[in-house]
Amino acid sequence: MSSSNGRKSIFITGAASGMGRETARLFAEKGWFVGAYDVNHDGLETLREQVGDANGSFNVLDVTDASAWTTAMDLFAIATGGTLDLLFNNAGIGASGLLDEQSWDDVMRIVNINFIGVMLGVRAGVPLLKNTPGSLCLTTSSSSAIFGTAGIPVYSATKHAVRGLTEALSIELKRYGVRAADLLPGLIDTPLLSDGMRQMAPSEGMWRLVEPREVAETVWEAYGTDRVHWYIPEELRDFHLRVVAEPEAVREERTALLAAMTAAG
Ligand code: NAI
């Protein structure tokens, strides 16, 4: 395993694809040591070829596996001398389906990966973050944490949980001098999106398709400041304010949208 040799370090879950992968590439370009973790071995191998062995460590990790987290973080600590500048708890799965029609296995899979995995990651990473001045504990929530999103109710609920957890951590972790922040992305053009969602995305506005590179650049910006919530694109912040100010109007609109989506099959 290569070592950081004094470079700053980032630990990324879901690094084999999409937003995590672009973040790994961007931070390596900026001279950081990258810990890339995923269940997708092949994706990690192609990332290794792009980033280079000397610039990171590329390992299979299932974020739902508590003992695997301990092993991964212990090995990462050996590579960095016990420090971690940025923990990016990003792995997640998207899943549509109405709650009463989904199998319980599917429901629990979403909860375990999208929320339990994040809590396990924070618990494993805090000892290293505490050792590192200016460190950041970053999570990937979602625009579906702005309002309860019909059609993806369990996904939306897990992302509310991640946002709530992160807000609490942004206060709790201050006792160690560690910051916490989350990303609230809209529609990012990654394999997680279904073809239908990609086709429905408008060409402009807050629901336009955004390149994953823009998310990586936001991660870079987030490391440099103390803001807690990062909307991508930024217009989603105005939408969030409207959801708070006019919840009934937004609910009517979302009801009409769900009906249209159901009719379209
Ligand atoms: P992606 O599908 O390209 O990447 C997600 C990665 O997570 C994959 O490489 C996958 O193998 C990995 N993963 C899945 N289960 C795992 C597990 N148990 N352990 C470790 N890794 C696992 O998707 P994308 O879009 O890059 O997703 C990243 C995060 O962004 C997710 O948390 C997702 O919920 C969130 N997000 C995505 C949006 C989008 O429009 N693409 C919008 C809002 C949030």
Image: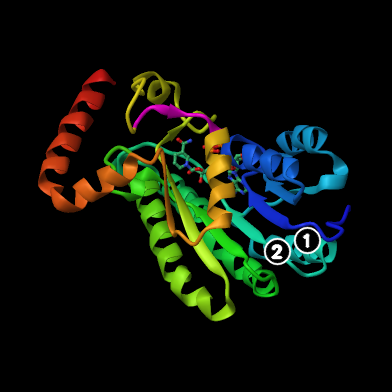
In this rendering, is residue 124 above or below 138? Answer: below
Q: Position of residue 73 (x, y in %)?
A: 73, 64
Q: Name the quadrant of the C terminus.
A: top left
In this rendering, is residue 59 above or below 195? Answer: below
Of residues 100 and 209, the one nearer the viewer is 209
Q: Is residue 12 magenta?
A: no
Q: Position of residue 57 (x, y in %)?
A: 80, 49
Residue under the image location 78 percent in, 61 percent down: 76
- The secondary element bearing badge 2 is classed as loop
Q: Earlier in the sequence, mark 2 or mark 1?
A: 1
Badges 2 and 1: C-beta atoms under 8 Å apart?
A: yes
Decide: few, some or many residues near mark 1? Use Cα within 10 Å; few <14, some 14-19, many ≥20.
Answer: many
Q: Is residue 38 left or right of residue 90?
A: right
Of residues 226 and 4, the one nearer the viewer is 226
Checking the image for residue 30, the label placed there is none
Q: Is residue 208 magenta?
A: yes
Closer to the camera: disc 2 or disc 1?
A: 2
Q: Which residues are magenta?
A: 207-212
Mark 2 to mark 1 CA distance (whole Å):
9 Å
Quarter of the image where one finds residue 18: top right
Decide: few, some or many residues near mark 2? Use Cα within 10 Å; few <14, some 14-19, many ≥20.
Answer: many
- The secondary element bearing badge 1 is classed as helix
Residue under the image location 86 percent in, 43 percent down: 53
Q: Can residue 91 be seen?
A: no
Question: Dot 1 corresponds to which residue?
Answer: 76
Question: Dot 2 corresponds to which residue?
Answer: 84
Q: Is residue 182 left or right of residue 154?
A: right
Q: Position of residue 211 (x, y in %)?
A: 52, 29
Q: Position of residue 243 (x, y in %)?
A: 21, 48
Indicate the amino acid at tag 1: Phe
